[in-house]
Amino acid sequence: MGDLRLYAIGLSEVRAVFGATSADADHLRDLARRAFAPQPPAPRRSGLRTLGPLFRRAPDAPVLSPTQPEPHDLDVLLAGGYVAPERTGATWRLLETLVAGLAWGSTRMALNGVALDDLDFALARGGAPASVGLRHLLDSHTGLSLIPVHGLTVGYHPYEVALAMGGAYRAAMPQIESAEQRELTGQLAGWLEGFVPWAQTAAARGRPAPDLLGFWVS
């Protein structure tokens, strides 16, 4: 099952993560530290026999998961350095975590390729132009200096297009026959309508208006 995650954040702020300034880097390190803080161990249940060292590894045996961020991945990202191919997946995960921490709002939907295209088709039948479809969002490149990884698509639309999406989705809803698609469209439209107040808050805080950034795991 696919997963589409949408964030309201200025693309310039995302690009600024690569080679971040000292002040911004401190804030980003704090976001990463809190997001990836070790979880406290679950309380041991009495009456259960503890398995021995069957799955235990030596404490000094380095194991680097290709998708689990490590401190060095954060150092490289914030320095704008070269990301080794085997660390690209972990760096994308780290970048999305930082995006989530900086974003004004976010939403997610369980959508595989078929469901995503079906929703776009339903929106088009309701009068929404293809330029505001989810597939078009994912086909619009971010220009981020991080090579793609298999199974992950990242795209964006500028603030003005995000506003147009919300209006088009709201207008298309009465023509959508499927109750499930109509409900999903309403949820999307409601979330996209938040871009106006988010932009006002961003301006008051000296930040850019939010763009629409999408991470889709197909």
Image (cartoon, rainbow, N blue to C red):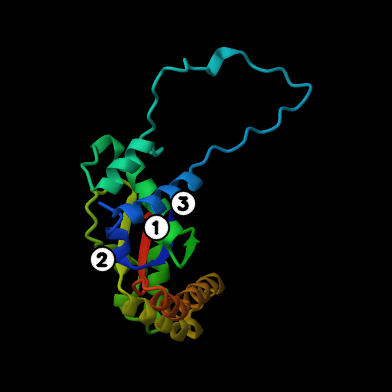
Asked whether 66 or 38 is in front, the reply is 38
Asked whether 203 or 210 is in front, the reply is 203
Q: Which mark is residue 99?
A: 1
User: Residue 130: percent from the left, percent from the top?
Assistant: 30, 76
The residue lying furthest to the right in this view is 47
Q: Which residue is mark 3?
A: 1
Q: Secondary structure at mark 3?
A: loop
**Three-letter residue code for mark 1:** Val
Whether residue 37 is situated above or below residue 162 in the rendered picture: above
What is the spatial separation of the Cα atoms under label 1 and label 3, in whole angstroms? 23 Å
Closer to the camera: disc 1 or disc 2?
A: 1
**Three-letter residue code for mark 2:** Ser
Which residue is depicted at the point 40% across and 83% down?
168
Report if residue 218 is visible in the image: no
- Mark 1 or 2 closer to N-term? 1
Q: Secondary structure at mark 1?
A: helix
User: Residue 170: percent from the left, percent from the top?
Assistant: 47, 83
Q: Which residue is mark 2?
A: 140
Figure quadrant of residue 192: bottom left
